[in-house]
């Protein structure tokens, strides 16, 4: 059974930083495209960033220059470094894995990020 477990969420003031981690178990992460999504109550889950198996990263416009996604296939982990946080970054952040083009098929349970002004 494939499991994704997020960690590193918390509360921080605007301008601060957090580093989220995602640990994958049950299969190798090597051939997975990995991503981060976030959701706030009453809104749909939105894409934040992803990184493909070749290490190329993509970001939603609102986080470009502030967030950095990375992966360590040897450790089967992925991370999201979030700098210069703003209140609009608050939400529940989910780690996801994609084994083939299309929708992400593996999801974690999420970790909460709260940014206060």
Image (cartoon, helix red, strand yellow):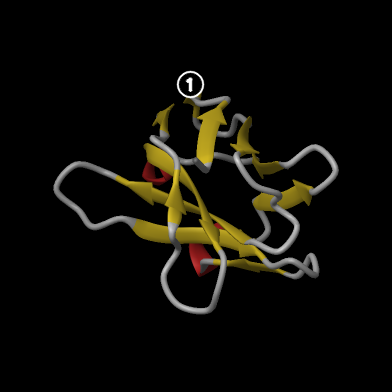
Residue sitting farthest toward the top: 11
Taking the spot 60% from the left edge, 29% from the top edge, the residue there is 16
Could you tell me residue 54's position as x and y percent? 80, 70
Could you tell me residue 43's position as x and y percent? 20, 53
Q: Is residue 19 above or below residue 96?
A: above
Q: Could you say which is closer to the camera, residue 60 or residue 30?
A: 30
What residue is pinned by disc 1? 10
Could you tell me residue 49's position as x and y percent? 56, 60
Could you tell me residue 38's position as x and y percent? 39, 48
Taking the spot 73% from the left edge, 41% from the top edge, the residue there is 76
Determine whether, in the image, residue 105 is placed left or right of residue 20: left
Looking at the rendered image, the quarter that the C terminus falls into is: top left
Determine whether, in the image, residue 54 is placed left or right of residue 57: right
Q: What SS does tag 1 mark?
A: strand
Residue sitting farthest toward the bottom: 101
**Label total for image:** 1
């Amino acid at each position: 059974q494939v499991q994704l477990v997020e960690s590193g969420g918390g509360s921080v003031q605007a301008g601060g930083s957090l580093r989220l981690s995602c640990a994958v178990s049950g299969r190798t992460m090597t051939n997975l495209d990995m991503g981060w999504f976030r959701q706030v109550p009453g809104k749909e889950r939105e894409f934040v960033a992803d990184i493909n198996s070749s290490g190329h990263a993509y970001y939603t416009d609102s986080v470009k220059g502030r967030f950095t996604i990375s992966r360590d296939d040897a450790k089967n982990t992925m991370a999201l470094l979030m700098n210069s946080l703003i209140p609009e970054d608050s939400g529940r952040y989910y780690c996801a894995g994609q084994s083939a083009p299309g929708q992400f098929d593996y999801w974690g349970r999420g970790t909460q990020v709260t940014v206060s002004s």
